Amino acid sequence: MHTAEFLDVEPADISSILQGGYNHPLLREWQSERQLTKNILIFPLFISDDPEDDTEIESLPNIRRFGVNKLQTYLAPLVAKGLKSVILFGVPLKKESKDPLGTAADDPSGPVIQGIKMLRREFPDLYIMCDVCLCEYTSHGHCGVLYDDGTINRERSVSRLAAVAVNYAKAGAHSVAPSDMIDGRIRDIKRGLINAGLAHKTFVMSYSAKFSGNLYGPFRDAACSAPSSGDRKCYQLPSGGKGLARRALKRDKAEGTDGIIVKPSTFYLDIMRDASEICSDLPICAYHVSGEYAMLHAAAEKGVVDFKTIAFESHQGFLRAGARLIITYLTPEFLDWLSD
Ligand SMILES: NCc1[nH]cc(CCC(=O)O)c1CC(=O)O
Ligand SMILES: [Zn+2]
Ligand SMILES: [Zn+2]
């Protein structure tokens, strides 16, 4: 053949050929800007105040709530498969331990502080994050301290949240993640950590863009944290509130957060993209929340989707949108799938 025949192609034809770029399984992986790896997965854990608890959560398939004595046996195989990081949620089952200030949140003998100590001791390489909020521990079920008229008392909420965050860090938490969405808490938490001499070894991961909607139901079952009256619409963002989310991202960055969470995930990919631009120097984390997880299970059971395929597809979406980390109830499945 003459060289000329190879070159006898119109430029328009050249640029229309894409399949040379993804005709092999390895090439298809090379096309991802970011790859889904075990390192980026953070697994949510519910720890209750009954040390022997081991309870199925009906609305959250395959996820259980554990007491501090039951957690080690459950986690050991996951750590062996490459689990790197967990985020803890405390669940007081005893109603009488709830009060208007959420005192039980940082009770030294409560589930989170006891959980941190046990995990640090038994799994020294595991990275321990703690969700910081009051709703699981308050008698009214709201995320902060309230005025008599039921509205949020910002000052008292924020100083209480900062105290809780500092106490988790003192107990050995590597990271604190405030999910309350009350204005100004990142600044107070950072200040509290600095004053306690812990700021240099505590990663503050702010739920900066957390939207109010219909996707937290199974979590509230698991954590017994539904508000007893009213809703969270005055502190969590309205779902159309893109501008508010952008302002919250800028505000939390200015207050010194070390990382950002966008939550929920699938329905808020534009916000994740905005976060990766506004906070381009910070790791962005997607939270695939309980309702999203339950929906995928329900759809798979109905035969609408294949569970493994949809799991990868949804989580790839977060990475494409700009996330670098993912909090996901699918972590145990991914640890298996990523070992294959
Ligand atoms: N502030 C508590 C909190 N922290 C994380 C979640 C949701 C997590 C999930 O649905 O998986 C919630 C629930 C809520 O705000 O009502
Ligand atoms: Zn809360
Ligand atoms: Zn929370």
Image (cartoon, helix red, strand yellow):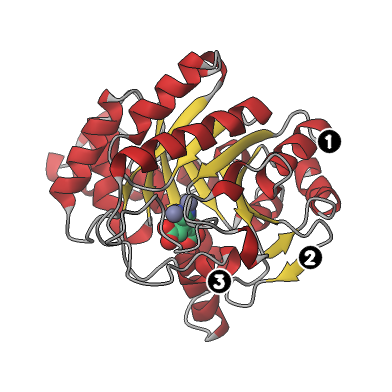
Residue tagged 1: 122
At 70% from the left and 38% from the top, the residue drawn is: 116
Mark 1: which amino acid? Glu
The picture quadrant where one finds residue 162 is top left
Which label's residue is closer to the chain start, 2 or 3?
2
Mark-to-mark CA distance, 3 and 1: 28 Å
Mark-to-mark CA distance, 1 and 2: 19 Å
Residue tagged 2: 54
* Residue 196 rendering spot, x and y as whole percentages: 54, 17
What secondary structure is marked by label 3? helix
What secondary structure is marked by label 2? strand
At 56% from the left and 47% from the top, the residue drawn is: 103
Which numbered circle lies on residue 221? Answer: 3
Q: Identify whether 310 is placed above or below 295.
A: above
* Residue 82 rendering spot, x and y as whole percentages: 72, 40
* Residue 266 rendering spot, x and y as whole percentages: 36, 59
- 185 or 121, nearer to the observer: 185
Relative to residue 234, is residue 243 drawn left or right?
left
Q: Would residue 333 be visible to someone looking at this image?
A: yes
Mark-to-mark CA distance, 2 and 3: 15 Å
